[in-house]
Amino acid sequence: MSKEDEDFVKVADTNDIKPSQMKEVQVAGESICIVNVEGKYYAIGNICTHEGGPLVDGTLEGYEVECPWHASKFDVRTGEVKEPPASEPEPVYQIKIDGNNILLKKQDKKSKSPLHQIELTLIEKDKVEGTDVMSFKFNKHNDDSDVENKTLLDYTAGQFAFFDIGEVYNDPKGPIRHFTISSSPTENFIMFTTRIRDSPYKKRLLALEKGTKVKVRGPEGQFVLHQDYTKPAVFLSGGIGVTPFRSMIKYATDMQLPVKIIMFDSNRNLNNIIFKKEFDEWASINKNFKIIYTISEKDQNDEQSLSLSTATDDWKGEYGRINKAMILKYVDTHVLDNSIFYICGPPSMLKAMQSLLQEDLEIPKERIKVEEFTGY
Ligand SMILES: Cc1cc2nc3c(=O)[nH]c(=O)nc-3n(C[C@H](O)[C@H](O)[C@H](O)COP(=O)(O)OP(=O)(O)OC[C@H]3O[C@@H](n4cnc5c(N)ncnc54)[C@H](O)[C@@H]3O)c2cc1C
Ligand code: FES
C-alpha cells in the first residue's frame, strides 16, 4: 500500500449513495455527509454551523445542500455558505473513488473543524427534585496547578455547545447533542441542564460516571445579553428553556450589571420550576432583576389541578400561560417600548410567544431574540 493510500479510509460504497442522495458517516468521531451529485462524490461536515442541524436530513439541489432546521444552504464542493442564517462555512473533505469504495482523506487533527473542540471531565450530576431534569457539571480548568487559571471553554452567558458523549448506540441522532451552557462564566464549573428522556443519548448521559471525559465543540450562538444596558431585558422562558436565562441572570448578578431584567418563567406545575431557589436568591440580592413565575397547566379556578400541588396555598405567582394581560401587569409602557425581548423554550411555546409579542403587543421583530430547543 502506498503512503498516499494509507492517508485514505473507506467510508461507504458507491452503491449505497445514488445520484442526488446523501449519507452520513462517522470518521474519528466526526459526523460527515457524503453527497452524490450526478455520479460525483463530495464530503462536507454534517453538523450545520448555524445551530447544529443534520445536513443529511436536508435537501440537495445541484451542488447546494439545505439544512432541515432553518434552511441555511452550503456548497458541497467548497463548504461555502450560500444562504444564511449560517455564517460559518462547513469543513469539506477530500474524496477518492477506488472501484466501488468511497475513500475519505484522513484529517490532520489541527485543521479538522472550524469549531474549537476540547475535552471536559464530568465532576457532578445534580437531579432537580421532583422532575426529570438533571444538571451535568464539568471541570472548567485543567487542574489546580494551572497557573494561568485559563478556562477550557471561553463562552458568553447564553451560548450553547455540542456535547459528544460517545458510546451511544441505535440513536438516529448519534452521540452529539447541543445544550445551552446553563452555568455563568463567573462560576467555577461548566454546566448544562437537560430533561432525561427515553432516547439512547439521554440514557447514556444518565449513566455517565464522574470522571468521564466528553468532547465539547463550541461555544456557539447569538442568544446573549445585549450590550446597551439602558435597554431593559424581558425574558420569556418555557420549561427547560430556562437554561440560557440562568446563565445570563447569574452573570448579570455577579457582575452587578446595570441592566434591568424582568423574567416570566412558565412551568407546568409548582413542583417542577427549575432553578427556583437560585432565582429567588438572586432576585433578593439583585435589585435590577425581577422574576414572575406562572404555572401553565392550570388556571386559578381549576380546583382539581390545584390540589395536585401541596404548596399551592402559599403560591404567590401567576396561573396559566404567559399572555398579554400578564405581561402588562408587570411591564410598564416605558419598559415595553424599550426592552429587548428574549424567548426560549420548545418549538410550540416559541411560536405562541412570538405571536403574543408581535401581534398582541406590537413589538417589532428587531427587538425580539429567540432560541428554539429543537428535539422537544
Ligand atoms: C440551540 C439549542 C440549545 C439547546 N439547549 C438545550 C438545553 O439547554 N437543555 C436541553 O434539555 N435541551 C436543549 N436543546 C435540545 C437538545 O439538543 C435535545 O434535542 C433535546 O434535549 C432532546 O434530546 P433527546 O435525545 O431526548 O431527543 P432528540 O434529540 O429529539 O433525539 C431523540 C432521537 O432518539 C430517537 N429515540 C427516542 N427514543 C428512542 C428509543 N427509546 N429508542 C431508540 N431511539 C429513540 C428518536 O427517534 C430521535 O431521533 C437545545 C437545542 C438547541 C437547538
Ligand atoms: S440552518 Fe442549520 S441549524 Fe439552523
Image (tube, rainbow, N blue to C red):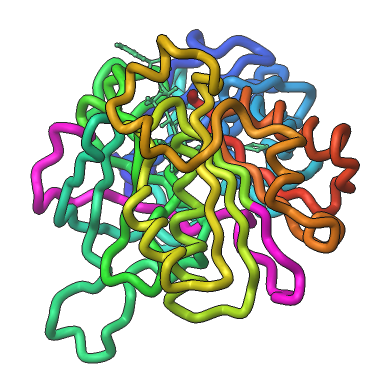
**Relative to 263, does residue 153 appear above or below in the rendering?**
below
- Residue 34 is situated, as x and y percent measured from the top left of the image, at 54, 27
- Residue 297 in percent (x, y) is at 50, 20
* Residue 317 spot, x, y in % from top left: 50, 40
Q: Nearer the viewer, residue 44 or 263?
A: 263
Q: Is residue 224 magenta?
A: yes
Q: Is residue 108 visible?
A: no
Up the image or down, 133 lies above or below 121; here it is above
- Using the rendered image of the protein, determine whether residue 202 is visible from the camera's viewpoint: yes
Q: Depth check: give the residue in front, 120 or 343.
A: 343
Vertical relation: 268 (above or below) 290:
above
Quadrant containing ligand 1 reads: top left
The quadrant of the picture occupied by the N terminus is top left
Q: Is residue 349 magenta?
A: no
Q: State left or right for residue 373 relative to residue 284.
A: right
Highlighted magenta segment, given as a residue range? 205-234
For image coordinates 84% across by 63% down, the residue present is 334
What residue is rendered at 52% in x and 56% in y?
159
Question: Farthest bottom residue?
Answer: 147
Q: Would residue 339 appear left or right of 240 to someone viewing this image?
A: right
